[in-house]
Amino acid sequence: MAEAKPISRKRTRKGTGNAAGLRKRLQKLLSSPSYQPMNKSELARELNIAPKQRQMLRNLLKELESAGTLRQGRKGRYVLRGSNDIVGILHFQPAGHAFVDPEGNRRERGIFIPRGASGTGLHGDKVAVRTESRSGAPHWMKHIKNAKTRNQLETKYSGEGRSTEGRVVKVLERRNDALIATFTQRGRFSYAKPDDPLLPPTIKLDNTALPDPAPNPGDKVVVAIEHWESRRHHPHGKITEILGPPETPGIDILQVICKRRLPRTFPREVLTEAKRFSDRVTAEEVVGREDWRTRPVFTIDPDDARDFDDAILVEKTKAGGYDLAVHIADVSHYVKPGSKLDREARLRGNSTYLADRVIPMLPETLSNGLCSLVPGQDRLTHAAIMHFDKGAKLQSLRFCKAVICSARRFTYQQAYNLMQKPNPQDPFSEHLQTAWELAAKLRRERFSNGSLDLDMPEVRAVLDKAGCPVALERIENDESHQLVEEFMLAANEAVAKQTKDKLKPSIYRVHEDPDEDKLFEFRQLALDYGINAGDLSNRDEIQKLLTVARGKPEEHAIKVGLLKSLKRASYCEDPIGHYGLAKTNYTHFTSPIRRYADLVVHRVLHNIAGSKAKMKTPALDQIKELAGHLSDMERNSSDAEFETQKLKQIEYLWREAKKSTRKNPITHPAMIHEVRRKGLFVELTDFFIKGLVNESDLPHCRGGYWFDGPGARFIGSKPKRVFQAGDRVKVSVASVDFERRMIDFRIIESS
């Protein structure tokens, strides 16, 4: 075998003063077949870097190591990470194992990290994982009761269905600089106990670094982990903020804000930049725009909405067709690329709508003021003007910059009432009827093209001024919501096709086809409710299943189950289509006040229109990075919104339970969704809140209950009783665990 040629020792200082040049030379050296691991000093000598420029090398090595490209071996010598090393975010599961989502490849499955193979990685950390393949069947196969079906699947997956396992080899970046914990003291030592059960149960604190004044035992605090040497020892951290006693009003939401690392204030320079704008549209800004101020455009939004970023107008043509104008707030006119406002909006990614507050993407002077399409005020818009024939087929499309003065602001309830009971005395009654006429046709056409009907009621907690829940409000997806939805979908689709056809780098909203494994699991769920399903890889079969479930008590559970089996929609640089909507072209254009992706799309559309004053838009590689960031931010916000709503819903039931008695219990209708050895998992059918009925809280039965595992049911005698999935029961709250976000119910028999 020929001996490897030694690395050239030729000295040159070419490119050492340029970071990009140094990066190329370093990467070439590291990937050379003859490279032997070197430390910083050896690398500096090999690359012939002058002493004054060695800081540049140190910074570059640190950057590459943080990104997971490099790793330090023994004695600080650097090597490229192996081909089976993957960088991603660590997500722990309650059972102790974890998954890592690979960075830069959101279409790849998560890597399974067995219990004990996570090193000193914490939930949410950026880590490097060394992988190995493991053959075997998917995890869900063990739940298949039919032996013949299970054997067939085991045969199928004996050579396929390979899953990837790995172990954490390095923590690249701690993401846990804002843990919510309870402060405790034991003797001379101080500790913090994180609220999140996915984190280590105890963090040791340095008594000499405690805030002055120190928190009281039991206080909620924000803790940052400073270092963690080994799983055999406690992590060490420091308190960065004292939140106060756990019963302090609003502290529950504040805990979620800190946990999700959501911003609480805008930087001063961002607010200063926002205040430089006039509080009204000036005459100069209107020049060159289409004037729609005398046209009866109107908005439809939730009762508590303060930022109105879309307005509509539908008019019937003489030929029986429809002219639809969708006006969207022209945020791009105010928020320029590279400005402080733009950088902050990009960092936030989107607005976050928590149970008791909004964390906006833009300061309120813009989001609730100058950009908001409030009635009676001139506002700048970017509009999509579409003409449909009488069959709701798109015939023509154009985009324009415009100025409007919204003639009417409807809440969803007001619009719905007027749609149900037209008022000849109200000129907007006819506008709404015409709008619904078109929207209904667009909706029917969408479903006939394969779009999935996943609309379902939403439950939100109604809070008093102190932030306490006083009611649970069920919001139905009625015709007023559907009207707005169809027009926004039409505008988003039109813009996506325009940017795609013009071959301009842009951001698209995508929804990939589901995995067959997940659809199989969903099919099993449907069978548990007595609904037979065909081959769910065929979209028509999914639509049939949803049609069968429509109007039944289990409809909500079926739709939630289907949503869980589908992949999550995200942002992408490639227009690969939207599975759920059955659209080849789709993007987000209609909410630039609260979504940064929409703002970027507005800028791209502005440039396509041939405007003389071009706006800077990201290149394709920058779009890819941005799409990943915005997808992450959206998911984080969505999880925070869900968590705060769940918190307030649980609190409402807890307060309700305090008024309930054994003699006069406050009850709710519920459905059994799953039966396990420890009890029945139920969901309230009025508010869609899930919980557990422990076996001990089943109705009294003299002979006790027998758990029939294969049949997934509880069977009682004296009197004869059976509890199984799909059964409807009446329940009241037995107990509430706020830390675990869990509710226990008990079944109440009718007297």
Image: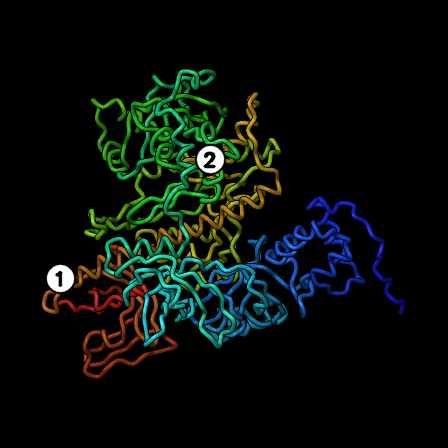
Could you tell me how many numbered marks the image carries?
A: 2
Q: Quadrant of the C terminus?
A: bottom left
Q: Is residue 170 left or right of residue 685?
A: right
Quickly name the residue at label 2. Answer: 589
Examine the rendered structure and indicate whether residue 80 appears above or below residue 570.
below
Q: Is residue 417 visible?
A: yes
Q: Is residue 397 left or right of residue 643?
A: right
Q: Residue furthest right?
A: 2
Q: Earlier in the sequence, mark 2 or mark 1?
A: 2
Q: Quadrant of the N terminus?
A: bottom right
Give the CA distance from mark 2 to mark 1.
47 Å
Label 2 Cα neighbours within 10 Å, binned few <14 / some 14-19 / many ≥20: many
Q: Position of residue 369 (x, y in %)?
A: 34, 30
Say which element carries label 1: helix
Q: Nearer the viewer, residue 696 or 272?
A: 272
Q: Nearer the viewer, residue 631 or 679?
A: 631
Question: In which quadrant of the rendered view does residue 306 lie?
Answer: top left
Examine the rendered structure and indicate whether residue 750 appears above or below residue 280.
below
Q: Position of residue 710 (x, y in %)?
A: 39, 77
What amino acid is found at the position of numbered circle 1 in the picture?
Lys
Question: In which quadrant of the rendered view does residue 271 lie?
Answer: top left
Q: Position of residue 142 (x, y in %)?
A: 48, 73
Question: In which quadrant of the rendered view does residue 345 lie?
Answer: top left
Q: Is residue 688 visible?
A: no
